[in-house]
Image (cartoon, grey):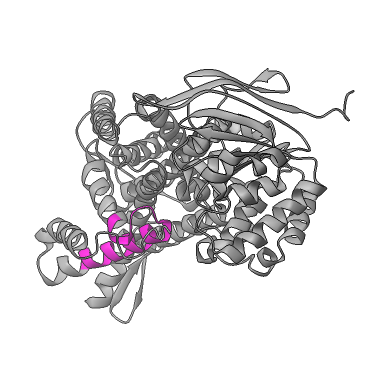
Amino acid sequence: MFFQQLVNGLAVGGIYALIAIGYTMVYGILFFVNFAHGDIYMLGTYCAFFIFGFMGIEVTGGVINVPQFFAALIPSMLICGVMGIALEKFAYRPIRNGSRLSAMISALGASLFLCNTAMYLFGSQTKPMPKLFAGEYITIGNTIISYIQLAVLVVSILLMLALHFFIKHTKLGKAIRAVSDDQRAAVLMGIDMNRVISATFAIGSALAGAAGIMVGIYYGAVYPTMGAVAGIKAFTAAILGGIGNIPGAMLGGVLLGIIESLGGAYISFGYRDAIAFFVLIIALCLMPTGILRKGRT
Amino acid sequence: MEESSPMKLVVEQLSASYGSINAIRGINLTCETGETVAVIGSNGAGKSTTLNCICGVVPASEGEVLLDGFDILDKPPHKIAMMGIAQVPEGRRVFPRLTVLENLEMGAYIVNDKAVLKERLEYVYNLFPRLAERQRQNAGDLSGGEQQMLVIGRALMRNPKFLLMDEPSLGLAPVVVENIFDIIAGLVKSSETGIILVEQNAAIALSIANRGYVLENGEITIEASAEELLHDDKVKAAYIGG
């Protein structure tokens, strides 16, 4: 059972990590928590839902193949990226020089707006999502690893590697890190803050969108309020790993997924969410800067 | 084309305030490419504010900053940087989690030509061989002196027309200060860059400058050649000591 829960935890953790990256990147640059991030994730799932509909796939009990999965994943990520840019432009940019409290209130407002718009446009009931693979799995010992779990893990890892490469080796990636280190010094280099901020929102939102699609397929459901709990969990993961730190968000996400799965199995499944938030409280009390600190000098 | 004629940076009647406190009032200052101008004054006189207004990171309340006759005061800081003004900020603001090489690459953020970038990198490594040795290390792990070399090198990466240096001697050991100023003096002799050097350490700043300004309580009180300032009794008493 331990290894089974480890596998389950890893799959969920990969998804938390993808969402947590968006929180941590925005925090690293603007020092506020983008509470509307979970709603972008939710919109990502809806994007895929409609793309599947457009492709003529039966959502109830339907099965998609790998090319169809990517045919939904890529445009959904792009749409979410654009929505992230728009979110920043309309909800945060006009008050960027205001207090951090105003940014937080605006974020909460944006979150409610997106969630309620989704309810209005798509209805508040839960809609089914098609499955990727028809429930095939492999067994190692007595641990069952489903193909979908493998797919979630592989896609999460690939996206995180791509992000790592982008942040480490591209000019824009380095500029994002420079702004996160010292904003004033960065603008003195000729770095356009607005461009860096837009890029940060686009990347974080695209990754959240990818997470949304995978969750939709993994659990077979999409509904307008799905961003709330996932968002808070990913936020917990970002804090756990050290907010502002990208590898920290990845580590925090995976750790949280595993802790939650193991706790759910060994304590009580009903306490899964409680365990995640218990971790948040412990993390805030014992190591408020997280496992990997931002490391300012 | 007037390629040989020097470019001019002219600051006219520049004022700025933080809330109700006037940080600087009616500052007039000029610098041409190829010359070095020292701005001396005590802590809080408004030296950093002046530089930050020129670079666009602190808003001015009044005045003009003309780069070759073109007013740059309302331009965003990254545009001003692209026009050829570079600042070496006070307190060695390296990007601590970026490597030395990445810090230098950020200095040349606006340079898109790879060949030019390589050439500038060689120039900076030549000027500061220490940086070449440490290029793979995180800037946050360097010593104070090395960090000061890095911020100067970083500003030179894009071959600016004007280099504004804010207290390069601050918080460094005397030996290190001498070393840094030897390099700045070399720079003054060899390059066409106009340098505005803001310093509390008046003696060392005036020793390498052509002209100097004394800034007191947000206003320029004396403007003279570096030579004259070095021998001015008032300057000697207030800023040089002895």
* Res A40 → quadrant: top left
Considering the whole magenta stretch, tell me its main secondary structure: helix
Query: What residue is rendered at 32% in x and 50% in y?
Result: A215
The picture places residue A183, in percent across and down from the top left corner, at 47, 43
Frontmost residue, A101 versus A131:
A101
Report whether A244 appears left or right of B155.
left
Quarter of the picture containing the N terminus of chain B is top right
Is residue B159 a member of the stretch shown in magenta? no
Query: What residue is rendered at 40% in x and 48% in y?
Result: A28
Query: What residue is rendered at 39% in x and 63% in y?
Result: A147
Observer able to see residue A285? yes
Frontmost residue, B1 versus A125:
B1
The picture places residue A266, in percent across and down from the top left corner, at 13, 72
Image height of B13 relative to A221, above or below: above
Q: State which region is magenta.
A: A239-261
Image height of B150 relative to A225, above or below: below
The picture places residue A213, in percent across and down from the top left corner, at 37, 46
Is residue A251 a member of the stretch shown in magenta? yes
Frontmost residue, A202 versus A246:
A246
Give the total of numbered labels.
0
Report whether A103 appears left or right of B95.
left
Observer able to see residue A131? no
Query: What residue is rendered at 27% in x and 30% in y?
Result: A102
The picture places residue B118, in percent across and down from the top left corner, at 77, 54
